[in-house]
Image: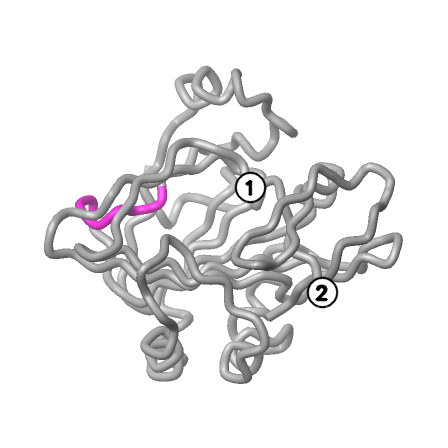
């Protein structure tokens, strides 16, 4: 299957070729200002990120079309794989959201803290209404740690950890190759993974979660 044949609704992933190209200068400047040395750096309160990711901007508008509703950015993470910081990520579902502060709320939990920021697992229908975009700042070929997705696994609801391997084996796995400026969008619940990058490679991706609506019980999306 070719990348252009995939759709978010059917397969859970969709390529938006080149749509971030007009933003690359600002995005690369943003990436250069963020300290390295960790697997992923959460971006909060940065005025450049806020401007580039607004709901009516290039990326936000595309996310809204894919989601079928107005959405806003609720979490942004820069992933920077290189010889200095390299890692592999096993198959998993994204199940937590970032919030501004902890408020005990029925059906929300367990809680975790990542880079000093509170995260919580919400009811899974919250995750199912979200769209995640990955903005590629470097070319990604098969050796440069492309995102791997288990196509259509976003339709299976919350998948128990012990069933993830079986679900991947029964799914078509697709490697999301990209050029600089491409954006891959995926349904946030899709099963996904990535390998470590090959020596001498660098792979920077700005990953942004978009969501609609507000949270209950005093909870508020972290935002960007």
**Displayed quadrant of residue 82:** bottom left
| Residue nearer the viewer, 18 or 119 | 119
Q: Which mark is residue 70?
A: 2
Quadrant where the N terminus is found in the figure: top left
Q: Is residue 27 visible?
A: yes
Q: Residue furthest left?
A: 200
- Relative image position of residue 9 (x, y in whole percent): 58, 43
Q: Where is residue 125 drawn, in percent x and y?
A: 74, 39
Q: Nearer the viewer, residue 55 or 103?
A: 103
- Asked whether residue 16 is in view, the answer is no
Nearer-the-camera pick, 9 or 60: 60
Q: Residue at x 57, y 71 (%)?
A: 44
Q: Is residue 132 magenta?
A: no
Crowding around mark 2 (Cα neighbors within 10 Å: few <14, some 14 to 19, many 20+) is: some
Residue at image position (63%, 77%) is 56
Res 184 → quadrant: bottom left
- Magenta part of the protein: which range? 142-147
Location of mark 1 (residue): 94
Q: Is residue 11 above or below residue 202?
A: above
> Is residue 74 toward the left or the right of residue 199 in the image?
right
Q: Measured from the top left, where is residue 187 in percent x and y?
A: 56, 45
| Horizontal arrangement in the rendering, residue 44 relative to residue 203 (left or right) | right
Does 158 sit above or below residue 63? above
Nearer the N terminus, badge 1 or badge 2? 2
Query: Please, what is the dominant secondary structure of the magenta stretch?
Result: loop
Colour mapping: one colour
**Given contact means CB atoms under 8 Å apart, are the residues at marks 1 and 2 in contact?**
no
């Amino acid at each position: 299957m070719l990348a252009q044949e995939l759709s978010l609704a059917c397969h859970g992933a969709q390529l938006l070729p080149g749509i971030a190209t007009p933003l690359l200068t600002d995005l690369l400047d943003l990436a250069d200002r963020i300290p390295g040395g960790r697997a992923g750096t959460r971006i909060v309160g940065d005025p450049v990120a806020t401007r580039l990711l607004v709901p009516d901007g290039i990326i936000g508008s595309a996310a809204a079309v894919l989601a079928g509703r107005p959405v806003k950015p609720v979490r942004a993470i820069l992933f920077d794989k290189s010889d200095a910081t390299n890692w592999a990520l096993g198959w998993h579902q994204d199940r937590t959201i970032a919030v501004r502060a902890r408020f005990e709320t029925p059906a929300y939990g367990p809680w975790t803290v990542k880079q000093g920021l509170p995260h919580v697992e919400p009811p899974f229908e919250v995750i199912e209404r979200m769209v995640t975009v990955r903005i590629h700042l470097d070319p990604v070929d098969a050796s440069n740690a492309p995102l791997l997705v288990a196509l259509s696994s976003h339709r299976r609801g919350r998948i128990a950890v012990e069933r993830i391997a079986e679900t991947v084996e029964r799914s078509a796995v697709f490697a999301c190759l990209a050029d600089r400026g491409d954006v891959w969008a995926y349904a946030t619940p899709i099963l996904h993974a990535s390998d470590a990058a090959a020596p001498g490679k660098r792979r920077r991706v700005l990953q942004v979660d978009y969501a609609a609506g507000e949270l209950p019980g005093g909870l508020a999306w972290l935002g960007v």
